[in-house]
Amino acid sequence: MPEPASKSSTLVIERKPKQTPEAATAKMVVAGLATNAISTREFSTYPFGDVNLTECLNALIDSAERVNQGDLGEAEALLAAQAVSLNAIFTYLAHRAQINIGEHLDAADRYMRLALKAQGQSRATLETLAAIKNPPTVFARQANIAQGPQQVNNTVSLGSRDTQPLARAGNSESEQDKLLEAHGERLDLGAAGTTTARDQALAPVGTRNRPPNG
């Protein structure tokens, strides 16, 4: 036989050794499971009658433990069921809006607004379910942050094995000189140049026969 209503609405809380009833009750209230069990029981009276509060709390504790262990099957099923229920609410309200749209435009507008809210909640529920089933991938860029001065060495490749640091603006000339010396192409701009075949002295122009002035 079912328990009397007075007993089914009484919450029985299990206590740990040396734990007072007040401490056990306070811990259960702070955890939030007891208050949610009460809300679930009160809002489920219409379809299910007088639900035992203690058994409702125990079932809620078991469900929370499965979630903590990584088993989201029950939560996924709940979201899928809620999405279907919200879609049923949308269909009913949209139908009520269609009935009133001919003569009662204000009522039709209210029904349609409520219908679209239910439709939006159904869509959001399905999006949440999809996010649980397929979590989005997050790409993060690495930021180099250090305390104090930083030195950044930018290098360019001079061959298959060696790399040469980019010269700073103030040392560009000295770095180029070292590079030329390494390849045997040092240019001595201070030495006197030798005369080559191209550097010939200009010969004096011979005297031309000109008619006398006058």
Image (cartoon, rainbow, N blue to C red):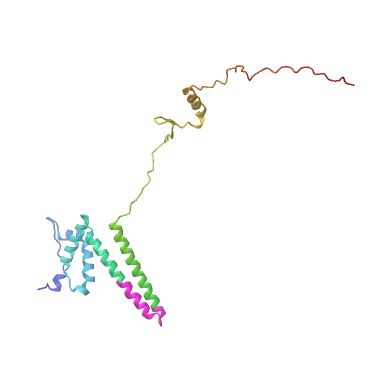
- Please identify the quadrant where the C terminus is shown: top right
**Residue located at (28% from left, 57% from top):** 133
**Magenta stretch: includes residue 89:** yes
Magenta-colored segment: predominant secondary structure: helix
**Magenta region:** 88-107
Q: Report x, y in % for residue 136.
A: 32, 54
Is residue 102 shown above or below 161? Answer: below
**Residue located at (22% from left, 71% from top):** 44
Q: Report x, y in % for residue 155.
A: 43, 33
Which of the 4 image quarters holds residue 144?
Answer: top left
Residue found at the far bottom of this picture = 103
- Please identify the quadrant where the N terminus is shown: bottom left
Q: Report x, y in % for residue 69.
A: 20, 54
**Residue located at (15% from left, 61% from top):** 21
In-image side of 16 versus 120 (left or right): left
Which of the 4 image quarters holds residue 142?
Answer: top left
**Magenta stretch: includes residue 51:** no
**Residue located at (20% from left, 63% from top):** 34
Is residue 209 shown above or below 142? Answer: above
Is residue 101 shown above or below 173? Answer: below
In-image side of 49 versus 88 (left or right): left
Which of the 4 image quarters holds residue 122?
Answer: bottom left
